[in-house]
Amino acid sequence: MKKILLACAAVAALVGGTACSGSGSSSAGNSFGDSLSVAFGKMQGAQTLQMTENIPADVKSKFSKDSFLRGFKQAVMADTADVAYIEGLMAGSQAWRNFNFWREQQVADADAQTFYDNFAAYFKRDSISMEEISTLNTEVQALFNQATARLQARQDSIRAAKQAEQSGSAQENKAKAAAYLDSIKAADKDVKVTPSGLGYKVVKQGKGALIGANDNADVIYTGRLIDGTQFDSSNGQPVNFNVAQVVPGFSEGLQLMNPGSKYIFYIPSDLGYGDAGNPAVPGGAMMVFDVEIPAK
């Protein structure tokens, strides 16, 4: 917003105060001023629209373009000769953002009128000593420290609640994964489990040296969850990566393979993305991979 106001001021100076001020609108014969006002208005409108498109969804749902335009118009149509008024609008907007932050974060139920009354009382004074400024700074810093501590405590509480929720979901997913692997083993005697807990099935064993722990390997793969949801795939094309740089279960499984091999991996979360998971794999979830090492 400050950039918009400053830009308006710059254009107003360029065209004699006519482009952004309602009190000094351009005359009928001022074609250059009209053209500049139209073009600049369109550009600023388009750029501001683009900025509002990047507003987070929860904020955007409460963002009113009519309210924005009301505030914008109040600044644009102001008497540009009254520089103090324009400065007050900008300073007030910034002060509101800083002051309102604590209310938005539910740290303090601060009152805007009380804030303004005290601001005005001190601002209207003839002078103030450095000693009094220092005392006020000390008082505000102490309150700021308390507010920061409250904010941290609230964030910790929210984080703990989220972690507890994730942990509960992760434990549930782990139980489902264990039951799934047991059912697969019972139905298919070719499914084996390593001491670490990695499940695997040899669909085809290749020939040649096994892949080493620090080797680079060309791998064709498709990853899915136990409900069949696909979360990753090489799309039938080999992807080259270092065996040591993938999740432990995938790395362990690759070291059982050689060129020409085809396996199925059943990777529990302890050998995958753990209780935290990632955007594609829920915490505690088992990953099932169809893996192929192309023959050389």
Image (cartoon, helix red, strand yellow):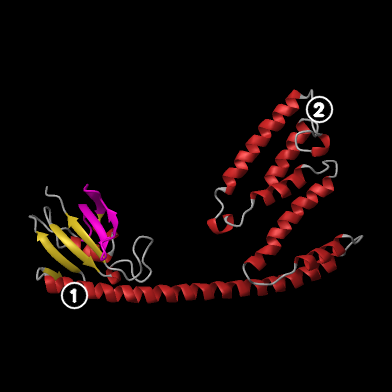
> In the picture shown, does residue 214 fall above or below 270?
above
Q: Which of the two discs, 2 and 1, sits closer to the camera?
A: 2
Q: Quadrant of residue 76?
A: top right
Residue 182's mark? 1
Report if residue 121 lies within the magenta region.
Answer: no
Q: Quadrant of residue 292?
A: bottom left
Residue 27's mark? 2
Q: Residue at x 24, y 75 (%)?
A: 178
Q: Quadrant of residue 226?
A: bottom left
Q: Residue at x 57, y 75 (%)?
A: 153
Q: Residue at x 35, y 73 (%)?
A: 170
Which is more toward the observer, 68 or 259? 68
* Residue 87 appears left or right of 230: right
Give the farthest residue toward the front. 66
Q: Secondary structure at mark 2?
A: loop
Image coords of residue 273 (percent x, y): 33, 66
Image coords of residue 176 (percent x, y): 27, 74
Instruction: Read off the magenta span.
Output: 213-241
* Residue 94 appears left or right of 241: right
Number of residues whose C-alpha sits closer than 10 Å to that of mark 1, classed few (under 14), some (14–19) or many (20 or more): some
Q: Residue at x 29, y 72 (%)?
A: 270
Give the farthest residue toward the right. 126
Residue 172's mark? none
Which is more toward the observer, 160 or 109? 109
Give the farthest residue toward the left. 207
Q: Secondary structure at mark 1?
A: helix
* Residue 207 appears left or right of 61: left
Marks 2 & 1, CB-CB < 8 Å contact: no
- Distance between mark 2 and mark 1 Cα atoms: 84 Å
Image coords of residue 10 (percent x, y): 74, 37
Can residue 217 be seen in the rendering of this structure? no
Image coords of residue 250 (percent x, y): 24, 62
